């Protein structure tokens, strides 16, 4: 039989997580007073569960809505309905569900733990401006990254990395090739909103805190989280620019104490690519997303570095607290 105390505790934790509930008491979570190793074990377990659950649920939805012929297609990656369904369910199951459940199960105040705190509107505008100005830096890092190659002894690994990169790019290009308004809205939700929310919850709100418990150094924690964030995408020829963005998002999180700040930054970063790609595919502009922000002007690159450094310094000086727990 299920222990009634566990059921009651879980119910109270779920109600506590809901933002519209006003509860004065803060009951202990189901898994309280755990070691950091045990916390990692729970998070990894939730990630595995979320991955399996999301794939199975996606297949079920595809089968019910689109029919068995979709699943029996010769090339599922050519089916946009399949790609979209798997993408949405994977984002929720792998990135959003695990950190939310982890916070509910381990923290007395899960909403606060995940960083859902209010931020001034002007800060949001500043962060959106920062991400637009950081493009020349990101593109320069991309150029350096693409120029890297592995020794001859690691040719097999390099070929695998290239194949993974080409596969990921092919899927992205297919999703961005549709120019109707419905596809544009789906792409904003699927490729901008969900990744921004889920990846910030997992890599910033959760991973940085757990790494800080391990290393007792917030800067090491931000760097390790940024490296994992970049590696998780399995796009190795974009590793450096994505790691750099992970560092920016991480420091914005620990200095603001709010998940909304890196979420907005992440959302704008992804959203700009989708908007530019849509405008280019529809024939409204002549510049593709790959060329957006590219420049040979040293003045623009220096200006990008100065503006980025100034905004980050402002975020540091106005920080409310460091995440030391």
Image (cartoon, helix red, strand yellow):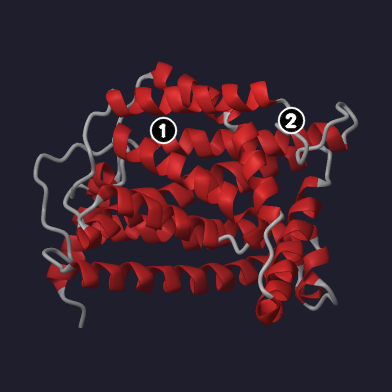
The answer to which quarter of the image holds residue 288 is top right
Q: Which residue is mark 1?
A: 261
In the rendered structure, find residue 73 and report the number of the disc placed on it: none
Q: Which residue is mark 2?
A: 295
Viewer-nearest of discs 1 and 2: 2
Residue that appears at 47% across and 47% down: 246
The location of residue 301, given as percent across then percent down, is 63, 28
Seen in the image, is 150 located left or right of residue 108?
A: right
The location of residue 183, given as percent across then percent down, is 76, 43
Residue that appears at 23% across and 39% down: 322
Residue 103, above or below 167: above
Seen in the image, is 200 located left or right of residue 186?
A: left
- Mark earlier in primary sequence (1, 2): 1
The location of residue 224, given as percent across then percent down, is 39, 57
Circle 1 packing at 10 Å, graded few (<14), some (14-19), many (20+), is many
Inspect this view and state whether residue 68 appears: yes
Residue that appears at 36% across and 22% down: 314
């Amino acid at each position: 039989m299920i222990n009634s105390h566990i059921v009651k505790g879980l119910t109270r934790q779920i109600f506590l997580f809901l933002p519209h509930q006003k509860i004065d008491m803060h009951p202990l979570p189901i898994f309280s007073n755990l070691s950091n190793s045990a916390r990692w074990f729970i998070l990894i377990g939730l990630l595995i569960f979320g991955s399996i659950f999301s794939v199975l649920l996606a297949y079920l939805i595809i089968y019910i809505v689109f029919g068995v012929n979709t699943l029996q297609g010769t090339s599922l990656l050519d089916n946009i309905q399949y790609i979209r369904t798997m993408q949405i369910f994977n984002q929720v199951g792998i990135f959003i569900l695990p950190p939310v459940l982890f916070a509910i199960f381990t923290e007395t105040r899960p909403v606060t733990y995940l960083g859902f705190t209010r931020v001034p509107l002007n800060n949001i505008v500043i962060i959106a401006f920062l991400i637009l100005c950081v493009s020349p830096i990101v593109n320069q890092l991309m150029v350096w990254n693409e120029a890297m190659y592995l020794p001859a002894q690691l040719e097999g690994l390099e070929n695998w990395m290239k194949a993974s990169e080409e596969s990921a790019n092919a899927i992205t290009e297919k999703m961005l090739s549709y120019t109707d308004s419905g596809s544009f809205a789906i792409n904003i939700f699927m490729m901008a909103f969900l990744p921004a929310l889920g990846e910030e919850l997992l890599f910033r709100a959760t991973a940085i805190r757990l790494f800080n418990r391990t290393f007792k150094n917030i800067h090491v924690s931000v760097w390790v989280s940024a490296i994992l964030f970049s590696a998780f995408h399995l796009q190795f020829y974009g590793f450096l620019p994505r790691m750099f963005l992970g560092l920016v998002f991480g420091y914005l999180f620990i200095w603001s104490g709010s998940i909304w700040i890196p979420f907005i930054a992440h959302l704008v970063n992804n959203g700009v690519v989708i908007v530019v790609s849509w405008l280019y595919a529809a024939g409204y502009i002549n510049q593709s997303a790959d060329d957006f922000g590219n420049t040979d002007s040293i003045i623009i690159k220096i200006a990008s570095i100065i503006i980025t450094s100034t905004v980050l310094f402002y975020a540091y000086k106005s920080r409310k607290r460091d995440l030391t727990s």
